[in-house]
Amino acid sequence: MSSIQMIAIDLDDTLLRDDISVSDYTKQVLARALSQGVRIVIATGRMFQAARPWGKAIGLGDVPVICYTGSMTGLCESGKIIRDVRIEKDRALSILSDIKAHGWYAHTYIDDELYVPFRDWRTDEYEKQCAVKAHVAGDDFWTPRKAPTKILVCEYDMEKMKGVEHFLKEKYANLVNQVKSKPFFFEMNNRECSKGRAVEELARSWGIPTDHVMTFGNGNNDVSMLSMTPWSFAVANASESAKKAAAHETLSNNEDGVARAVEKYVLEG
């Protein structure tokens, strides 16, 4: 009998295939794990409103959905937000002031809504990928009245992205949690938040030791949860940092890597 009591799974490029779909085989494997009493959690950098439909589509029930790289947790079916840890407002305003001064393009996320200073092709691309609608805030974008859950800088020029990383990492080191979730996305959230910490908190609330938790990821924002358990798996298409953090490697996202590992080590273990 497997000792795994909880499974935390990243969405993009881990559970989801490149065409943003999930196979029937994967759905069946996860349903079997749930039927055996294993708790399943989604852990993503996405917004709650962009992640929640996937939990519904896969048929996971009212499972927790860890969003914004660990800053927010909501329940899939009911939509109830059970955790929302934001960037301190003064710090967020300072970051946004620096982003504006450098002419970088950014998103803010407040009350699980997406805000942008203006609309361009990057907005369209993000909306298409995540199935959300952005609110164009104009000049008010730079001085939000509420503290944001996350700030994201979007830069497709890799040389410019190096400048974004260098400046923000140097100025805000240890003041916010910073991660490059994709080559063109540099994200900041509260310094106390990460996927790993959010997974650990849920496991603790259920009385589950971390060595009975299985985690799956592919990106730099998955490192914290891949390094927390001996049952961590990087998909074959994962970044080098994710592979180094994980205890094991499974097949790629396009080859049902998550389901293959769950079937072997949980259902057959």
Image: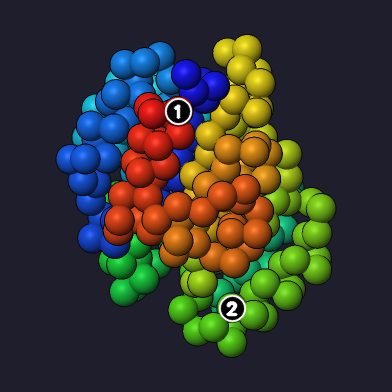
Q: Amino acid at mark 1?
A: Gly
Horizontal relation, residue 153 to residue 57: left or right: right
Q: Which residue bears the numbered disc 2? A: 161
Residue 206 seen by the camera:
yes
Q: Nearer the viewer, residue 67 or 24?
A: 24
User: On the image, which quarter does residue 137 sit in?
Assistant: bottom left
- The structure residue drawn at horizontal position 67% and vertical position 45%, both measured from the top left corner, is 227
Point out residue 139 in the picture as x, y percentages from the top left corner: 50, 62
Q: Amino acid at mark 2?
A: Met
Q: Which residue bears the numbered disc 1? A: 269
User: On the image, which quarter does residue 198 sit in?
Assistant: top right
Q: Is residue 48 above or below residue 108?
A: above
Q: Is residue 15 above or below residue 60?
A: below
- Secondary structure beneath dot 2 equals helix
Point out residue 220 in the picture as x, y percentages from the top left corner: 59, 58
Q: Is residue 107 above or below residue 34?
A: below
Point out residue 215 in the picture as x, y percentages from the top left corner: 53, 39
Point out residue 207 in the picture as x, y percentages from the top left corner: 63, 12
